[in-house]
Image (spheres, helix red, strand yellow):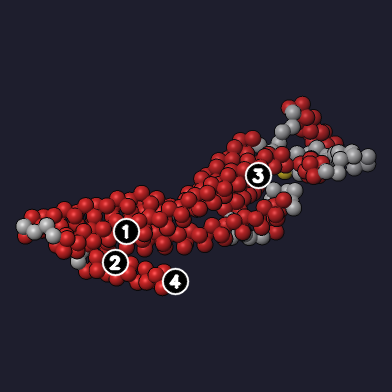
Amino acid sequence: MILIMIQPVLAANAAVFAIKNATMEGKITVVVLLLLSLFSWTIILGKFRQLVIARQATRKFFAAYASTRDPLDIQRRGEEFDGAPAYHLYIRGADELAYQLKNNPVQNHASPRAIVGDNTESGHTDLLARSTPTKISLASFEAVKVILEEAAGAQAMALEKGMIVLSTAVAGGPFIGLLGTVWGVMSTFAGIAEKNSASLTTMAPGVAAALVATVTGLLVAIPAMFGYNFMVTTIRALTQELDGFASRYANQIEHVYVDHRPLAEEIRDANEVLAARITNALKGETPGL
């Protein structure tokens, strides 16, 4: 028990001794590594908080979206799920869809037809699609899909922002420390050659000071490695969920709001509208009828 308590003290004393005897090059190396560690810990803490919020908000958003049939319900209700990448993608798509419905509408005058004996969610969605009078064309839907792809890419980039610092700390920290160590050992042997003395007392301070750079590099790289692996796994999961939701969302928009009527049905609807207008015009000309 006493030995366990003494070991950290000895390690701390050894580090202090090594830093005091370090050369200017070794001290510069340690300072650079400490700055890199500061940046990496800033990214670790900030990114961890971002990912926790993203996972919680995404879970809530998916639950809310699953309870709706109309792809625009959440936007119309004004619900917000800040921090959820899928929600920001949804809003971009919903805004573009609303713009296309307002500026490039396609009127569907076909009467809604219920699906007999089908009370499933797909049946309700089919009924909603048939009862939606204002739709968009395939060209307008392509514009919505482009916005969804851009939003998915932007959210993926936002999730990965700052990860380059962690990868640099993992890959570069040990090598920077090794550079300081080699440089310190080289300076130590140069000093021994000048003094013409190769005793352990002469070599020990310089070698210890050189090795502290390697230790510092490992202390920078090890936490960054664990943080990087955890965050990359979480970001990959969120990105896959985002891609899956983008495909599902685009499919629902196409099913409910895109005009897929056959040409014959479009001609029939146009003839019905024209016949109704002619009938109204004739009634207006002959008030006695």
Q: Please name the residue that numbered disc 3 is placed on.
A: 249
| Depicted 240 relative to depicted 279: above or below | below
Q: Residue 281 sits in which quadrant?
A: top right
Badge 1 amino acid: Val
What is the distance, in whole Å, between disc 2 and disc 3 at their CAs? 57 Å
User: Around disc 4, counting alpha carbons within 10 Å, would you say few (fewer than 14), some (14 to 19), or many (20 or more)?
Assistant: few
Q: Please name the residue that numbered disc 4 is placed on.
A: 1
Q: Residue 268 sits in which quadrant?
A: top right
Residue 125 x/y as whole percent: 77, 43
Which of the pair 142/117 is nearer the observer? 117
What is the distance, in whole Å, between disc 4 and disc 2 at their CAs? 22 Å
Q: Secondary structure at mark 2?
A: helix
Question: In the picture provided, is 168 more to the left or to the right than 81?
Answer: left
Which residue is found at the position 26% from the left and 58% from the top?
A: 211
* Residue 15, label in figure: 2
Q: Please name the residue that numbered disc 1 is placed on.
A: 215
